[in-house]
Amino acid sequence: MTEQKRAFKLCIFGDGGVGKTTLIRRFVTRVFEKDIKMTIGADFSVKNVEIDGEIVTLRIWDFAGEERFRVLLPSFAKGADGGIFMYDITRYSTLNNMKDWLSIFEYFVSDDQMKIPIIIIGGKADLQDKRSVEPEKAQELSINYNLQGFYECSSKTGDNVAILFEYIARKMLENTG
């Protein structure tokens, strides 16, 4: 008898250049890729994680952050089970559009279904000397927007990368019962 797998659609969104693609590649391949080309529209990756002995397949959708691609988010986000809003800790401006990103994402995802878990991630945590967003500010936004958690991570060093994906996978499992 084969073990039953659960699969979830996870969307990662935020402004361009915050490190969404690098984060996903680090999680999927465990390798840091320094020179990654800009995402056009959306990209897609798959990775299995084990949560409490259960295999969970994450279908990870990476959304282009540039304004011109934002119109695509609603159609790509449909049917999502969870979301990650990502910003760059060295660029305070990447938090400015958080409300817009969340409203687009939540409006088009929640078709009378349960509210899906969304977390906020501060990327490029290895660049502490260039920090412009304090963790307390992101934590405050996480609470104000009723998000399910906050992490900072570094795709370069790998710090917190696997942990944040396991955390959101656990939240999606809890949300679906």
Image (cartoon, rainbow, N blue to C red):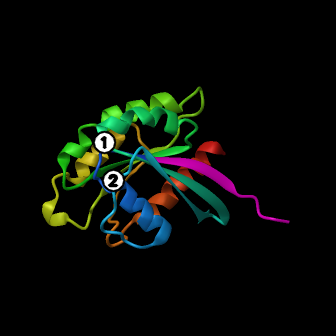
Q: Is 7 colored magenta in this rendering? A: yes
Looking at the picture, which amino acid does disc 1 mark?
Glu
Which of the image's four quarters has the N terminus?
bottom right
Image position of 126 (left or right of 149): left
Task: Determine the residue positioned at 45% across, 72% down.
Answer: 30
Looking at the picture, which amino acid does disc 2 mark?
Met
Q: Position of residue 142 (x, y in %)?
A: 35, 43
Q: CA distance from mark 2 to mark 1?
A: 9 Å
Q: Which residue is mark 1?
A: 66
Give residue 79's mark: none
Task: Determine the residue positioned at 14% across, 65% down.
Answer: 129
Q: Position of residue 143 (x, y in %)?
A: 35, 41
Location of residue 55 with respect to 42 vertically, above or below: below
90 and 54: which one is in front?
A: 90
Region rendered in magenta: 1-11
Which of the image's four quarters has the C terminus?
top right
- Asked whether disc 2 touches disc 1, contact meaning CB atoms under 8 Å apart, the reply is yes
First of labels 2, 1 by sequence position:
2
Task: Determine the residue positioned at 39% across, 57% down.
Answer: 21
Q: Disc 2 on helix, strand or loop?
A: loop
Q: Position of residue 31 (x, y in %)?
A: 41, 73
Q: Position of residue 78 (x, y in %)?
A: 55, 35
Q: Residues within 10 Å of mark 1 (few under 14, many from 20)?
A: some
Image position of 98 (left or right of 84): left
Image position of 92 (left or right of 9): left
Location of residue 167 with respect to 68 vertically, above or below: below
Q: Disc 1 on helix, strand or loop?
A: loop
Q: Which residue is mark 2?
A: 38
Tally of marks:
2
Image position of 138 (left or right of 7): left
